[in-house]
Amino acid sequence: MAQVAVKQEQHVHVADTNTGISNRKLLLWVFLASDCLFFGSFIATYLVYRNQSTTGPYPNEILDIPITSVSTFVLLMSSLAMVLAVNYAQRNSVGLARFWILAVAALGTVFLLFQIYEFTTFVNEGLTIRSNLFGTTFFILTGFHGLHVFIGVLWLLGMAFAHFKGALTSRSVEDLEMAGLYWHFVDIVWIIIFTVIYLIGFSDGEGLSTIEHAAAVVGG
Amino acid sequence: MANPIARAWRKLFYHEGDRYFLLPRTDSALPNPPNEGPFGDAGPPVLAWLNRLTYGDRVPTPLFYTIIGIGLGVLTVIEVWFFTMRDSFGAFFVTVMLLLALFKFVVVVAFFMHLRFDKNLLSLVFASGFIIAIAIFVIMLVVQGQFSPDKLVAA
C-alpha cells in the first residue's frame, strides 16, 4: 500500500502505447536523430574546407580559447541544472524545479552573450561570413547552434512562467523532460564543436604568413 | 568468457538485466527493502553509503547528477590543459581530444538524457541518426579527397 502511495506521488510512469514510450517523447527523439544529420553535415563541411582559406584571418589568429572555454563550461553547467530541474519535477518539488529551469535559461543566456561578444569581435577583426572559407563554415555552424540555444531559452522561459504555476502533473513533467532532452542535445553538439573547431582546429594556419598559406593551399 | 569490453558496456549502458539504475516499472519491481540500491547489504559499508547518496525515491538523486556534472566540468578543464600542452603530444593530441569529447558525449547522452534508464528503442532511434550522420561525414570527406591521415591530423 505504501509503495502504491509512493508511486502516485512520483511522476515516473509507463505510457499507454505499444512501445511503452509516449508518442511525443518518441517523436522528439526522432527529431534529435534528424538534427544529428543537420549538425553532422555542417561539421563535415567545416572539416572538408578546413585549411583551405586563401586569405585570413585564420583560426589561430582569431579564436579566443580562454573565453570559449568559459562559455563551454557555462553550457555544461546549464545541462547539469537542466537534469536537476527534471529530477526535482519527478520528485514533485515544483519550487526547486522552477528554480533550476530559470537557472538553465539564465546560463543559456550567458552563453548566448558570450557568442554575441565573440561574433562581434571577429567581425571587428575582419572575419565575416564572406571573408574566407573558415569564416563561412564557422559562422554557419556556430550560428545555427546559437539559434538552437536561443530557441531552447525561449522554450524554458515559456515553461517556467506558463506551465509550472500549479501542481505538477505527469504531462507537465514529460513536457519538462522533453525540453531537457532538447537542451542536452544542444550541449552535446557544442561538446563536438568545441573540440573539433576550437581545440583541434586552432592550429590551422599556424606558423604561416598569409602569402605562404595561400601558396600552400594552391600548391596542393 | 564474455569480452571484457562487451561486459563493461552492458554493465554501464545496457538497458536490460543487471544494470546500476533499473527504474521500477511495476509495484513488484520496487526495491525490497526500498532503495537498497544495486548492491543490497553486500559489500563494504562505503557502497551502502554511496547507494543511499545516489539512489532514492526510485530515481537517481540530485547528488548523483551533480557528481556527473562536476566530472564533466573536470574533463573540460583537462581538455583545455591538453590544448595548452598540444605541442608536446603531436598527432596524439587529436586522438586524445576526440576520445575525451566522445566520452563526454556518451556520458551526457547516457545519464543526463536518460538513455541509460529508458527503453532500448530510444537508443536505437538516436544511434541510427548518429550513425547516418557519421556516414555522411565520412562520405563527404572521401568524395572531397580529404580522408587521409595527413589532412585530418595536420596541424
Image (spheres, coloured by chain):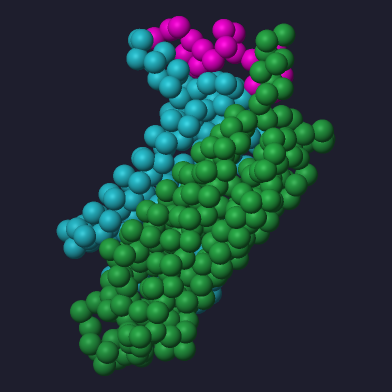
Chain colours: A green, B cyan
Give left or right: position of A36 versus A202.
right
Does residue B34 show up magenta in the picture?
A: yes
Dividing the image into 4 quarters, which one contains the C terminus of chain B? Answer: bottom left
Q: Is residue A121 above or below residue B94?
A: below
State which quadrant residue A207 falls in.
bottom left
Q: Quadrant of residue A196?
A: bottom left
Q: Measuring 59% from the left and 8% from the top, which residue is drawn there?
A: B32
Number of numbered markers: 0
> Where does residue B53 sit, x and y in percent of width and height?
43, 22
Q: Main secondary structure of the magenta part?
A: loop
Per the rendered image, the range of residues in magenta is B24-43
For the point 65% across and 21% down, which residue is it?
A: B24
**Residue B20 screen position, x and y as percent:** 51, 24
Q: Is residue B106 visible?
A: no
Closest to the observer, A137 or B71: B71
Q: Is residue A126 above or below residue A71?
A: below
Instruction: Identify which residue is drawn at 40% across, 54% down.
Output: A74
In the image shown, does B30 or B125 lie closer to the viewer?
B30
**Viewer-proximal residue among A163 and B51:** A163
- Residue in front for this viewpoint, B120 or A141: A141
Residue at the extreme front of the image, as rendered: A165
A193 is higher (above) or lower (below) than A141: above
- Can the viewer see residue A7? yes
Residue plotted at (53% across, 21% down): B56
Q: Position of residue B144 (x, y in %)?
A: 50, 77
Q: State the residue lying farthest toward the left.
A: B88
Asked if residue A205 lies in the magenta stretch, the reply is no
